[in-house]
């Protein structure tokens, strides 16, 4: 999984029907709190909101998270991070 | 999923027969509206056209989108984006 | 899928037997006709030759293309490109 | 698989229930002992601790390692490295 | 698949039991004979040795190569390269 920040939402009326009802969250991968890599669009599965630091998964893991195995989902928010404890 | 822009179309007469009938769209991944990464060829599944800003998926998600699970598809357009609302 | 150019062939006598009979094509991914990323070795499934501009797929899509689902193939040539029409 | 160093732990109370009980380890991929690429969050499956040099896997391999095939896991620690012997 | 060079071996006593008996080879991906990307740890399936130029596969393809479908393997050596013939 990766750490990311939700920086926005994406709306698409004309989309695959198996994305219907999914909250599409624009998610910025982070490295040590800084943007690292391109934002991606992840389906929210844990009630995350804009600005929150989250855990996201990609590939088949994301379809498991969304419980939509036969869907076109390839990224999902799977946790809202409380803390990141770095080794001293 | 990723945000991209359809920048062209690709034609290939000699191809895997399971790509027959697929619209092959040259898609430029975007980050904040700017090109980010190399273009890829995605199968259209939602009636997207050149110049449109789209949502695309890769891997098995794309075969689900195209309803062609046993095909050589590894990228598909799965939505046409209406809006991207960034956090203030 | 990605656009690439076949720049060579690879021979490996000692290899997984499920690669036996496969033409191993050294393929350079392209972006706007220029090299973009590292070459990879893709199994030819459409009769492509050296110098041709092709469509290649990676991951499980490539095993579908080669009709060798239980094989160690992770990249395959799935089309020979006639034309790439870019938006004006 | 890749070589990495465990540099911290991640806590997320609100997460997919199939991550419950998983130790979420912030893991820095290494190349020749130096950071190489962005840290990722991997589920520990071998009792690894902070500071240890580990072997991690991604994708479906990680779900096999965690014995949670239908979970949102996409990275897992699968070994604790004793030694890396480089060719002379 | 990718071309790589075996630059070392990795030992891990505490590891997933499904890696037991696997030779863990530190493999440097190559582009035109030069290092290209970070080394990865691939399971040998063809009797490759240190210094050899090999063909490696990643993802599910690697588990097929190792005949360990339910294992935490995500990279495997699947061929020992005899020759790479580049187009004139």
Image (tube, coloured by chain):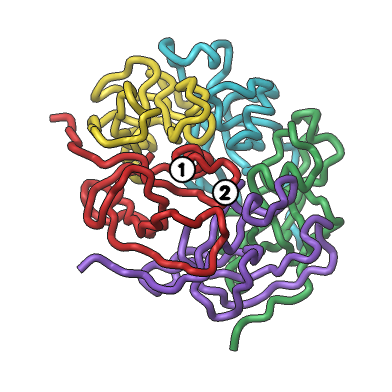
Chain colours: A cyan, B yellow, C red, D green, E purple
Expressed as whole percent of the image width and height from the top left, the position of residue E30 reads 44, 68
Whether residue D69 is visible here, answered yes or no, is yes
Can you say whether D85 is above or below E12 in the image?
below
Can you say whether A86 is above or below B1 in the image?
below
- Residue at horizontal 18%, vertical 37%? C83
Verify CB contact (< 8 Å) between mark 2 and mark 1.
Answer: yes
- Residue at horizontal 79%, vertical 44%? D66
Letter of the chain that mark 2 sits on in the rendering: C
Q: Relative to residue B3, is residue A88 drawn left or right?
A: right
Letter of the chain that mark 1 sits on in the rendering: C
Can you say whether D46 is above or below B80 in the image?
below
- Residue at horizontal 29%, vertical 34%? B26
Q: Residues within 10 Å of mark 1 (few under 14, many from 20)?
A: many
Q: Nearer the viewer, residue A34 or E41?
A: E41
Expressed as whole percent of the image width and height from the top left, the position of residue A29 reads 54, 42
| Mark carried by residue C71 | 2
Question: Looking at the image, which residue sits at the far front?
Answer: C21
Q: Quadrant of residue C82?
A: top left
Mark earlier in primary sequence (2, 1): 1
Can you say whether C24 is above or below A26 in the image?
below
- Do discs 2 and 1 belong to a common subunit? yes
Secondary structure state at the residue bearing disc 1: loop
Q: Relative to residue C14, is residue B44 drawn left or right?
A: left
């Amino acid at each position: 999984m990766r750490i990311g920040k939700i920086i926005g939402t994406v709306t698409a009326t004309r989309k695959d029907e198996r994305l219907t009802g999914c909250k599409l969250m624009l998610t910025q991968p982070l490295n040590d709190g800084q943007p690292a890599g391109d934002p991606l669009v992840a389906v929210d599965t844990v009630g995350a909101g804009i600005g929150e630091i989250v855990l996201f998964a990609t590939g088949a893991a994301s379809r498991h998270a969304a419980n939509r195995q036969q869907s076109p989902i390839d990224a999902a928010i799977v946790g809202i991070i409380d803390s990141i404890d770095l080794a001293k």
